[in-house]
Image: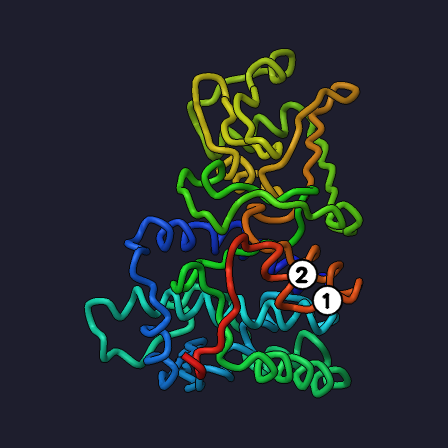
Amino acid sequence: MKKILYKVVAVSILVLLLPFIMTLIFSNNNKRNHSLALEAMGLNIYYEKNGTRQKLDFDQYLIGVVAANMPSGYNIEALKAQAVVSRTYALYNISLLTEDNPNKKEFTTSELGLSYISPEEMETYWGSENYLKNFTKLENCVYGTKDEVIVYKDSLILPVFFGTGTGFTRNAHEAWGVDLPYLISVPSKDDVTSIHYLKITEYAPEELIGLLKQAYPSFESGEKTIFEDIIISGRDSTGYVTEIKLGNISLSGEEFARTLGLNSNHFYIEDYEGKARIICTGVGHGVGLSQYGANAMAEQGISYDKILTHYYTGVKIINLDNT
């Protein structure tokens, strides 16, 4: 069950969260002053599923977000870092959603853009025997960092995160074409020790051609020409694929990864005994905080605030209750 939850998180970060991140990035982000966030602390969140609507306060919501986005078995300092990230991310988005309606105090979990699971779903994922222990652990992380957020020059940051890196995180400018000074490449060396770091997939040429033609009907190739017709034409400084060409069709690395269900767009394609072998490393988009890397740092005795200032350059951790 833990593996299933990890896969759900990995897929949501790569496939579901990335378009949402892009929306936030290209919104006007010059006025994310944390005073806006302070006013939002009296809000209510609603979780809608299967025709039901469950009301949550902000801290209850955060517990469910941390549960959905990071393995509960991670070190408590990594989970605290995720709690602060989740709080900042939600409040950043709330500041966007309230620009035209400052009195808005009710939001749905889907509006806030982060995966969430209810206590009932937690018990299903973890099992009844582990539920209370894990829930209490996450509750302590949320309340142990209560009201703490990440700011850069007195404004809330957009604290993007991902599952597992490839040795270095990516620059936001290279990944998405935007300059966010707190999202620059930093080392995350322990990521290569993750069991999820490497995934190798092999396709018979006709199988890969068939999959790509389903998504791109105009793509033409054959068993003998497939390695000439699929060309990686662009990488960033950390090795993530930025452009790939399928014949005369040009795609981003992210789109190709989504099409084939790859864990990330850090991949290589090679001819292995007549089969197309795709070697993929890392999980997620590679920008911001590496969750696996954060846990590795925590296991080395590094505190959550130091973890956050490592992955987000030039930031401060502040308490909204003291501003």
Q: In what quadrant of the picture does the C terminus appear? A: bottom left
CA gap, disc 2 and disc 1? 6 Å
Crowd around label 1: few <14 · some 14–19 · many ≥20 (10 Å)? few
Q: What residue type is labelled 2?
A: Tyr
Q: Which of 260 and 286 is in front in this view?
A: 286
- In-image side of 111 versus 255 (left or right): left
Q: Which mark is residue 257?
A: none
Q: Which mark is residue 2?
A: 1
The spot of residue 1 in percent (x, y) is 72, 68
In percent of the image, x 42 and y 82: which residue is there?
52
> Which residue appears farthest toward the left when viewing the image?
100
Q: Image quarter for residue 30?
A: bottom left
Q: Which amino acid does label 1 sit on?
A: Lys
Identify whether 31 is placed above or below 231: below
Crowd around label 2: few <14 · some 14–19 · many ≥20 (10 Å)? some
The spot of residue 224 in percent (x, y) is 64, 11
Residue ID for mark 2: 6
Q: Which of 265 and 208 is in front in this view?
A: 265
Q: Nearer the viewer, residue 8 or 312?
A: 312
The spot of residue 271 in percent (x, y) is 72, 20
The spot of residue 289 in percent (x, y) is 59, 55
Identify whether 52 is placed above or below 125: below
Q: Are marks 2 and 1 in contact (CB under 8 Å)?
A: yes
